[in-house]
Image: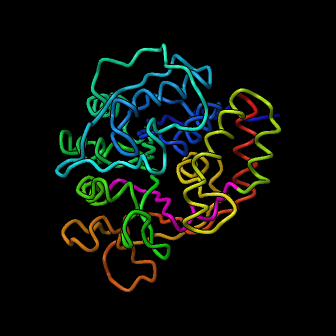
Amino acid sequence: MTGPAEEPMKIIIDTDPGQDDAVALLLALASDRLDILGITAVAGNVPLPLTQKNVRIVCELAQKPGVKVFAGSRAPMNKPLITAEYLHGKSGLDGPVLPDPQMPLQPQHGVDFIVDTILREPPGDVTLCTLGPLTNIGLALQQAPQLSERIKQIVMMGGGLFEGGNVTPAAEFNIYVDPQAAQAVFASGIPIVMMPLDVTHKVLTTRQRVADIAQLGTPVARAVVEMLEFFERYDEEKYGTDGGPLHDPTVIAWLLKPDLFSGRYCNVEIETVSPLTEGMTVIDWWQVTDRPHNALVIGDVDADGFFKLLADHLARL
């Protein structure tokens, strides 16, 4: 006998695609274990007009045009926007040639959608999956502080410890773009699972792993391979590796198969003042302070298991 089927996990994805965001979205869209209540776009890798467009392009690539997509914040909470076209290309999704989306953008602002949805759903039901700067979440918490008691957890890609930063020596891009929003999130009391560069730099798009995805032979697999071949060129040169890190899909992989990952509970604080270390995630990995733990910081991953999970899911689309 089998037990009752597990209810799908209710999630909101907040994202700034970005090729690695696109792969994370495809992984989520392929899963029957996730109930995607909506996807909110934020300015980050490229400006908001492109990120909201790119989310819809990816939904249509996955043949999921019914997913609700919302445009959120155009700029960080209180600093100018910094983008990363040098990595992602002018469109944010350079690599494949994909058609402009036909599916509509929802009229509601992404921040309002986050607030309304979490207030409407039962407390502890909704997980936020953040793949970009945390602006939309910071603004939602500002607008409705009571959200912090209702959100089940935030699973986020951002920050770094032993790997340092990838946009300054101290700071990872998602946190650096909007440190004030990150500070608000880490101070909120919401349970946080954090995917820093320390773990994402262990999931490399090696030639063999990309070849395994190519073997699927589907339009989705072809688009993913073209995205990865464009996206990895910068990091291969920078780090001297076979393949580049696939950052954002670790968030969705953790929801689907947390036993691929290991980490520890730590205190994480965000530097917002120093010009030298702005956006740094100060992670008390060795527990040298008595500051309370506020995040499960992931440090290791079964990379082969991660890529098997990814290929198995991409094969469904």
Q: Is residue 174 above or below residue 50?
A: below
Q: Is residue 199 magenta?
A: yes
Q: Position of residue 298 (x, y in %)?
A: 53, 65
**Residue 152 lies in quadrant:** top left
Q: Is residue 191 magenta?
A: yes
Residue found at x 54% / y 25%: 59
Q: Could one spot residue 88 in this view of the protein?
A: yes
Q: Position of residue 180 (x, y in %)?
A: 23, 56
Residue found at x 42% / y 68%: 165
Q: Position of residue 161 (x, y in %)?
A: 45, 73
**Residue 314 lies in quadrant:** top right
Scheme of image coloration: rainbow
**Residue 61 lies in quadrant:** top right
Residue found at x 62% / y 38%: 27
Q: Which is more toward the observer, 226 or 41?
A: 226
Q: Is residue 72 above or below residue 264?
A: above
Is the N terminus in the top left, top right, bottom left or bottom right quadrant? top right
Q: Could one spot residue 125 in this view of the protein?
A: no
Q: How many marks?
A: 0
Q: Which is more toward the observer, 211 or 87?
A: 87
Residue found at x 48% / y 66%: 297
Is residue 118 left or right of 3 when viewed as pictured? left
Residue lying furthest bottom: 288
Is the C terminus in the top left, top right, bottom left or bottom right quadrant? top right
Q: Which residues are magenta?
A: 189-205
Is residue 157 left or right of 259 when viewed as pictured? left
